[in-house]
């Protein structure tokens, strides 16, 4: 697929020697807080200062941002530090006010991306405006909604675009606040290889102690940079305090991260890589053969149940299988959640096959 360099123009124009770093507080709280944080970030690898002016909250009563009065604070950040500035817009009115105050980059939040009507409203408000727009993934793991949001901005002629991967909500999150589900971001890049892909480890992690590890994973997957929530006094932040870090911590993280080269032309590397890939190809073909055999057995079981008028779903038997397979997986060093997901998918297909037996 041909790369559209126009979409990367805003990023390439910065002539960066490192992945882009977008940093700043979750929320603009006071002019003093915004400027103090920005001046501390000026001496780090930060390229763009971020701050939420309008903050969509899940339930009313919490801090929902200072609103339009915070936009002049971002103008001061530009004047005093030379950093570009960005903020989230959630409707056409936000767009109008942000453009009036010369905001350099706009981003569309996860709660907005889920609503095609609002996305279209924002896109229409930006028609004819040459400004970079970054689109966060929707709250729920729905690739089509994310792709659709990108397409809506493309359809009105917005040429400078990027996407932000901030993870996806789950009913019972464990390690992450929002599970990364890396494969969804990878699928989006397959559809739009020209779009800069930026990682938001703050919202994925939900806590500051895991931001480095998630950021390194992003670099290992060739992400173009990061949006990291940074506050001069994060413990006393008015929103999302636990996931914000200090400018000094950000500086250390960016120094410690290892930037991987995309390719190596060393002969021994290429030789070993090709050998391992051939091994994987053989294993993948073997997996398909095994799955084919398993589904053929499922079909036989389905026919037997049909003949005896026995219910297809045997919950106790299924629980035994899942419990046994996850124990075997853990014993062999495999991730339990990964194996559960595989066997649940296999089970659903087995049920479908048994149900369709005549």
Image: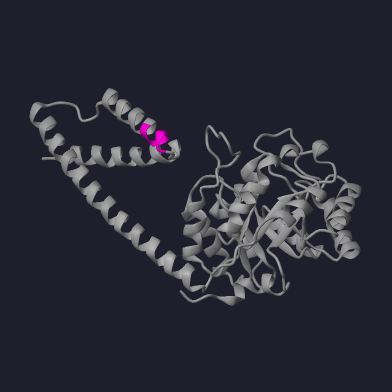
Q: Which quadrant, please, contains the C terminus?
A: top left
Q: Nearer the viewer, residue 69 or 121?
A: 69
Q: Which quadrant, please, contains the N terminus?
A: bottom left
The residue lying at 64 percent from left, 61 percent from top is 259
Residue 110 in view:
yes
Q: Which residue is most to the left?
A: 307
Q: Is residue 329 magenta?
A: yes
Q: Position of residue 134 (x, y in %)?
A: 64, 60
The residue lying at 24 percent from left, 26 percent from top is 314
How has the structure been colored for display?
Answer: one colour
Q: Which residues are magenta?
A: 328-332
Residue 129 in view:
no
Magenta span: predominant SS is helix
Q: Position of residue 99 (x, y in %)?
A: 76, 64
Q: Which residue is most to the front?
A: 268
Q: In the picture shown, does residue 22 fall above or below 352?
A: below
Q: Position of residue 206 (x, y in %)?
A: 66, 40
- Asked if residue 331 lies left or right of residue 52, the reply is left
Q: Nearer the viewer, residue 337 or 162?
A: 337
Q: In the picture shown, does residue 346 fall above or below 9?
A: above
Q: Nearer the viewer, residue 56 or 8?
A: 8
The residue lying at 49 percent from left, 76 percent from top is 2
- Asked if residue 181 lies left or right of residue 40, the reply is left
Q: In the picture shown, does residue 193 fall above or below 49?
A: below
Q: Position of residue 305 (x, y in %)?
A: 13, 30
Q: In the picture shown, does residue 272 fall above or below 110?
A: below
- Asked if residue 150 lies left or right of residue 271, the reply is right
Q: Quadrant of residue 162?
A: bottom right
Q: Nearer the viewer, residue 116 or 321?
A: 321
């Amino acid at each position: 697929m041909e790369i559209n360099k126009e979409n990367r123009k805003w990023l390439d124009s910065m002539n960066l020697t490192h992945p882009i770093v977008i940093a700043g507080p979750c929320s603009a709280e006071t002019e003093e807080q915004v400027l103090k944080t920005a001046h501390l970030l000026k001496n780090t690898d930060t390229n763009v200062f971020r701050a939420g002016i309008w903050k969509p909250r899940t339930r009313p009563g919490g801090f929902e941002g200072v609103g339009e009065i915070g936009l002049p604070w971002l103008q001061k950040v530009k004047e005093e530090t030379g950093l570009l500035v960005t903020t989230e817009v959630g409707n056409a009115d936000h767009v109008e006010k942000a453009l009036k105050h010369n905001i350099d980059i706009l981003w569309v939040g996860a709660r907005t991306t889920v609503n095609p009507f609002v996305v279209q409203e924002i896109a229409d408000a930006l028609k004819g405006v040459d400004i970079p727009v970054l689109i966060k993934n929707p709250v729920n793991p729905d690739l089509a909604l994310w792709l659709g949001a990108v397409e809506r901005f493309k359809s009105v002629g917005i040429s400078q675009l990027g996407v932000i991967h901030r993870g996806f909500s789950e009913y019972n999150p464990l390690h992450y606040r929002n599970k990364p589900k890396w494969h969804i971001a990878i699928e989006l890049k397959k559809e739009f290889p020209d779009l800069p892909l930026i990682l938001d480890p703050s919202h994925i992690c939900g806590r500051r102690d895991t931001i480095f590890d998630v950021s390194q994973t992003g670099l290992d997957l060739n992400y173009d940079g990061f949006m990291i929530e940074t506050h001069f006094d994060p413990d006393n932040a008015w929103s999302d305090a636990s996931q914000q870090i200090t400018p000094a911590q950000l500086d250390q993280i960016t120094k410690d991260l290892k930037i991987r080269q995309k390719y190596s032309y060393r002969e021994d590397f290429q030789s070993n890589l090709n050998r391992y890939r051939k091994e994987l190809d053989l294993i993948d073909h073997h997996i398909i053969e095994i799955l084919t055999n398993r589904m053929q057995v499922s079909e036989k079981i389905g026919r037997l149940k049909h003949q005896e008028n026995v219910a297809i779903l045997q919950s106790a038997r299924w629980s035994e299988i899942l419990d046994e397979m996850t124990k075997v997986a853990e014993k062999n060093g495999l991730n339990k959640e990964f194996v559960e997901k595989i066997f649940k998918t296999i089970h659903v297909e087995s049920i479908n096959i048994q149900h369709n037996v005549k």
